[in-house]
Image (spheres, helix red, strand yellow):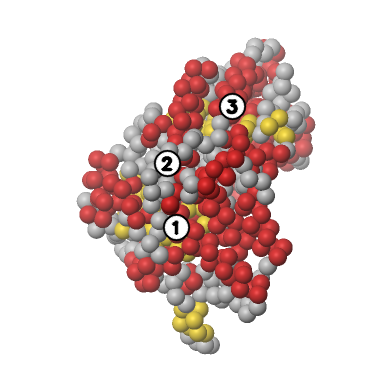
């Protein structure tokens, strides 16, 4: 069978983990791959202690981008933000465990990119509310 | 330079001298492949089944030789060197302009502006003609089929001018809704811009009729010929548009070549687009007079090798005969429309049902498999298809798909390519339909990807 589409990848694609929405997320971002128009929306529920308690995503895309999002959401659930901030592209690729060609890297890394934006948006938003509170 | 039997036969009966129409045999794609050096290499050990010609075409040796000749033997700037090689370069560059004019039957080579691609040609018109002629509350009519190249420049223009865009919708089969077009023309648009052949669906639009309707409503017309010039005989005088654009790299020519054709009086009245050398007549510190058309629009050193390569590509195609290429592609599309639904269960094919209404493009999806994955798996069998939105996101929104896969043809494409595509798609389905262990199954959420 094909390595790239090994069983685990295909399973994540067919039945992605953490697929859905959160009723009251503390961070949200919609990421898009301009090359193909694929989108994912990532929602995080972050506790006051800075731990990602809840995570969910929606979207449609190729097996690689969907499996990557499914695995990444598993990976970050229950983790503190400092640890999540250290996640690299290579970590995501290692988790996928497949050879990704340069043309498909954007698919594999869409979820990580979206996660980073969601966290950056939240920091910007917090900074904004801090200023407003002052 | 190798001459195929095809080529030799074609040269023996140039169309211009064929007083009595000699019926020539159909194109022989297998023989023609010998003209394209890329087929000398194997991809993953197999002959390349190149099904992405709508994106860019392969280049025949004749084009490569023409470019190489310029680069090796007479590399010189154009319109400057008062010496042998400079004169050769200028002559070859200007000869390409004549070849372009002849290829699309433009009445006068001075109406051909050599540009880098269709995108640049459309931007030239949008900036130069558009900025001067589009004002507040004016309307520009486009269609839902347009490539981003024939959409975004107009968006920028109407934003700047506070003008409006209207869109001719498509029917579900990808043909334009001409009733709505007629209604939109009653708003008396200043400009109508649409594609001759859709790169997304292959739809061949009734350009002549649409131009006539637009003119009757008082609008000028720009036709995007990026997917027409490579696949059909194009006659800009018969079409009677005001602007016609295409890219050289889709017409077997090099990247960095292309053309804008426009009626002389329009070009004369238009202000320059890019400014600098070559486009001037006299420059003083505070004022400049401009060169004549078309050079007024060719600022800076052009891509000379590419322009010369395009001339060679058009020679090559003129020798083969664009009517034969059209017939070849019509036959191939018909074959694909018959074979793919039969051999690939569940495949969705978009666009007009009849090959008569389609250029050499077949766009499709497999249920439950994203086109990216389709393209990746086909690549293992050396089958190259395009996957994505093909720079037509609004069209894909209309189709309700984020992305599709597309197979497109040119002279070197044949039935074997389509048979390999059908077989490749079946093996994609086998990869995606196979049972997998449930060990990774999610506990809660259902998948959006199971049924698509
Ligand atoms: C219909 C159409 N218009 C315009 C373009 C833009 O061509 P280029 O990228 O060569 O400028 C394309 C290329 O895909 C096209 O298919």
Taking the image as shown, residue B396 lies to the left or right of residue B429, namely left
B415, above or below A81, in the image? above
The local crowd at label 2, few if under 14, some if 14 to 19, many if 20 or more residues have their Cα within 10 Å, is few
Q: Position of residue B260 (x, y in %)?
A: 45, 60
Q: Nearer the viewer, mark 3 or mark 1?
A: 1
Q: Nearer the viewer, mark 2 or mark 1?
A: 2
B234 vs B42: above or below: below
Q: Residue furthest bottom?
A: B285
Residue placed under numbered mark 2 in the picture = B22
Disc 1 chain ID: B
Residue count near mark 3 (Cα–Cα under 10 Å), binned few <14, some 14–19, many ≥20 = few
* Image vertical order of residue A120 relative to residue B344, above or below: below
Q: Are marks 3 and 2 in contact (CB under 8 Å)?
A: no
Count of numbered labels shown in the rendering: 3
Considering only order in the chain, which callout, 2 or 3, is on the residue closer to the N terminus? 2
Asked whether, in this view, residue B10 is left or right of residue B85, the answer is left
Gap between marks 2 and 1 measured at Cα: 21 Å
The residue that disc 1 covers is B102
Q: Are marks 2 and 1 in contact (CB under 8 Å)?
A: no
Q: Is residue B213 visible?
A: yes
On the image, which quarter does residue B443 sit in?
Answer: top right
Viewer-closest of A114 and B184 = B184
Helix, strand or loop status at disc 3? helix
In which quadrant of the rendered view does residue A103 lie?
A: top right
Residue at the spot of label 3:
B416
The residue marked by circle 2 belongs to what chain?
B
Q: Residue at x 24, y 45 (%)?
A: B182
SS for tag 2?
A: loop
Residue A2 percent across, percent down from the top left: 72, 22
Which residue: 48% across, 58% down?
B100
Q: CA distance from mark 3 to mark 1?
A: 34 Å
Label 1 neighbour load within 10 Å: few <14, some 14-19, many 20+: some
């Amino acid at each position: 069978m094909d390595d790239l589409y090994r069983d685990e990848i295909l399973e994540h694609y067919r039945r992605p983990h953490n697929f859905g929405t959160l009723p009251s997320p503390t961070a949200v971002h919609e990421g898009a791959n301009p090359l193909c128009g694929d989108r994912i929306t990532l929602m995080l529920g972050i506790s006051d202690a800075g731990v990602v308690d809840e995570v969910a995503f929606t979207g449609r895309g190729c097996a690689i981008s969907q499996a990557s999002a499914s695995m990444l959401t598993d990976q970050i659930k229950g983790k503190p933000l400092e640890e999540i901030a250290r996640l690299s592209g290579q970590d995501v690729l290692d988790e996928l465990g497949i050879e990704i060609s340069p043309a498909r890297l954007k698919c594999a890394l869409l979820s990580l990119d979206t996660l980073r934006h969601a966290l950056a948006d939240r920091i910007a938003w917090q900074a904004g509310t801090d200023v407003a509170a002052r | 330079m190798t001459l195929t039997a095809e080529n030799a036969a074609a040269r023996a009966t140039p169309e211009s001298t064929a007083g009595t129409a000699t019926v020539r045999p159909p194109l022989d794609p297998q023989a023609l492949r010998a003209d394209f050096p890329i087929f000398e290499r194997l991809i993953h050990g197999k002959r390349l089944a190149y099904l992405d010609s709508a994106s860019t075409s392969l280049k025949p040796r004749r084009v490569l030789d023409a470019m190489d000749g310029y680069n090796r033997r007479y590399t010189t700037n154009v319109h400057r060197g008062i010496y042998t090689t400079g004169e050769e370069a200028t002559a070859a560059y200007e000869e390409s302009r004549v070849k372009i004019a002849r290829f699309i039957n433009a009445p006068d080579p001075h109406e051909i502006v050599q540009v880098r691609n269709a995108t640049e040609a459309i931007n030239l018109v949008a900036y130069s003609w558009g900025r001067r002629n589009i004002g507040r509350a004016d309307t520009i009519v486009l269609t839902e089929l347009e490539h981003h190249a024939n959409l975004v420049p107009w968006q920028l223009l109407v934003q700047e001018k506070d003008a409006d865009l209207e869109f001719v919708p498509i029917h579900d089969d990808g043909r334009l809704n001409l009733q709505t077009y007629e209604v939109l023309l009653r708003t008396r648009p200043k400009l109508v811009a649409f594609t001759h052949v859709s790169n997304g669906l292959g739809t061949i639009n009734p350009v002549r009729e649409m131009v006539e309707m637009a003119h009757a409503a008082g609008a000028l017309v720009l036709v995007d010929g990026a997917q027409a010039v490579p696949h059909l005989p194009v006659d800009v005088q018969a079409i009677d548009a005001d602007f016609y654009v295409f890219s050289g790299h889709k017409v077997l020519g090099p990247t960095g070549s292309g053309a804008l054709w426009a009626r002389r009086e329009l070009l004369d009245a238009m202000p320059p687009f890019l400014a600098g050398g070559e486009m001037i007549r006299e420059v003083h510190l505070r004022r400049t007079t401009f060169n004549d058309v078309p050079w007024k629009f060719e600022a800076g050193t052009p891509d000379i090798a590419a322009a010369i390569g395009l001339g060679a590509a058009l020679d090559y195609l003129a020798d083969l005969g664009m009517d034969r290429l059209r017939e070849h592609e019509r036959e191939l599309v018909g074959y694909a429309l018959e074979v793919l639904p039969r051999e690939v269960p569940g495949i969705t094919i978009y666009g007009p049902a009849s090959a008569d209404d389609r250029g050499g493009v077949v766009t499709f999806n497999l249920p439950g498999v994203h086109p990216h994955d389709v393209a990746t798996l086909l690549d293992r069998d050396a089958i190259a298809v395009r996957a994505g939105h093909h720079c037509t996101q609004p069209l894909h929104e209309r189709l309700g798909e984020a992305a599709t896969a597309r197979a497109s043809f040119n002279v070197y494409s044949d039935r074997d390519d389509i048979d390999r595509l059908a077989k490749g798609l079946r093996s994609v389905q086998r990869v995606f339909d196979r049972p997998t262990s449930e060990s990774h199954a999610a506990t809660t959420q259902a998948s959006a990807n199971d049924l698509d």
